[in-house]
Amino acid sequence: MKKEVFNPFTVVHEQLEACAKILGLNENVYNILKRPMREIHVSLPVKMDDGTMKIFQGFRVQYNNALGPTKGGIRFHPDETIDTVRALAAWMTWKCSLLNLPLGGGKGGVICNPKTMSSGELERLSRAYIAGIWKYIGPEEDIPAPDVYTTPQIMAWMMDEYSKIAQKNQFGVVTGKPLILGGSPGRDEATARGGLYALQEASDELGLDLGYSTVAIQGYGNAGYNAASLAKSLFGCKVIAVSDSKSAIYDKDGLDPEKVQKHKAKTSSVKGFPGAKEISNEELLELKADILVPAALENVITAKNAKNIKAKILVELANGPTSPEADDILFAKGVHVLPDFLCNAGGVTVSYFEMAQNFAMYYWDKEEVDKRLARKMAEAYHSVLHHSKKYSINMRQAAYVVAVGRLAEAMKLRGWV
């Protein structure tokens, strides 16, 4: 039997269509939002360490700029596709609107395997990518950022390459930079921290005491590790399970996030962590835990397993982890879903703070960044909750109603429709 291919951009269309029906959206607005505003495809010749030349395929999608310059990360991944980049650019558009940021949505990607590349090869690829798209980006046009397998160092190379082409320092052309080059305190943990601020609001709404709550986290990269560490340090949650691409581990008495991270750094996996039971990623999703955090891949909660989800709150740090069919099942079960483009908006919010600091050439301390992030996440959560109750719809549909409603208003005022 042929394996069904998951297309995240199809999910975007399904979710947008449902929102359009709830809002009674103008057909012209709907047709504009179904498609990216601009796509850039580039072929990137890079000289490898062995002297050979390799051609990489790169993308940049600028989805919609009705609210401001487009903004979004760049992924380096061997399985990158243009439809994935389109979907992520669309979700970034909704995300910026939902958080009431003066930004549109964009996303970039390069088909490569950074795990097999040297530092020199990654630098040459990073610079080649910027050389290929520089005409279409800039502090007031489109501002890239780190994403899967891209780092502050890669952002520094990209900023430097753009500055060379522009013949002047342009620290604001990317965010997620090292602090010494205009980065913002708190950016490395912003996605997880923002999600946990939303969780705090949700727990208050549901009357759930986080200090006595258990947490299972699928994915132990940057977002997953920081979510585990912050859940324990901020709220006193017990982290009972975590996973990566190789294994999942479980301990009913609780895992120490820092020790698990050190083990992973040493062995390249959470697998084999002393004292923990090895389980599958699928089993992790169905554990009896108060809070489930998908922080890795798209489409992990589907119609097949949604009925087995036992968590009270779903904290979607990953992009697109839940299918539309699963959303309906979870809503009927009473699972409180914090949808991805609300829950993981901490990253772009602190990136926006970084942009503001770059423009002002005045930098805040981490306490100020965290305080502003907490306020933004709380405002967004309660706006979504209000619309969920008003229309008797699930939280994802409510997030769409808020975000798309703002975009529709901006397009109308600008005379686009």
Image: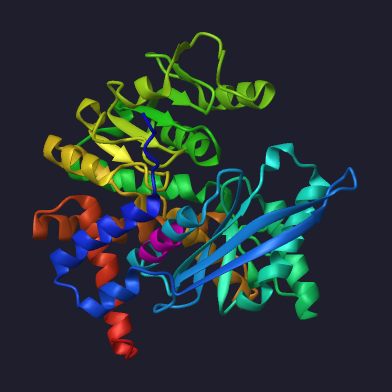
Give coordinates of residue 87: x percent, y percent: 42, 57
Q: Residue 180: tell me if it is visible.
A: no
Establish if 352 lies above or below 381: below
132 sits left or right of 214 in the view:
right
- The residue drawn where x is 30% and y is 88% is 413
Give coordinates of residue 23: x percent, y percent: 16, 69
Residue at the bottom extreme of this rendering: 415
Which range of residues does the magenta coloring cover? 88-94
Q: Which of 195 and 212 is in front in this view?
A: 195
Which quarter of the rendering shows the N terminus? top left
Q: Quadrant of residue 285?
A: top left
Q: Residue 321: tell me if it is visible.
A: yes
Q: Which of 42 and 393 is in front in this view?
A: 42
Q: Nearer the viewer, residue 119 or 129?
A: 129
Give coordinates of residue 20: x percent, y percent: 20, 67
Which quarter of the rendering shows the C terminus? bottom left
Instruction: Count the numbered circles shown.
Output: 0
144 sits left or right of 130 in the view:
left
- The residue drawn where x is 54% and y is 23% is 246
Q: In which quarter of the image is residue 378?
A: bottom left
Establish if 414 lies above or below 381: below
* Colouring scheme applied when the structure was drawn: rainbow
93 sits left or right of 161 in the view:
left
- The residue drawn where x is 69% and y is 43% is 114
Magenta stretch holds residue 243: no
Magenta stretch holds residue 91: yes
Q: In which quarter of the image is residue 50?
A: top right
342 sits left or right of 83 in the view:
left
Q: Characterize the magenta stretch by its predominant secondary structure.
A: helix
Establish if 344 lies above or below 295: below
Residue at the front extreme of this rendering: 1
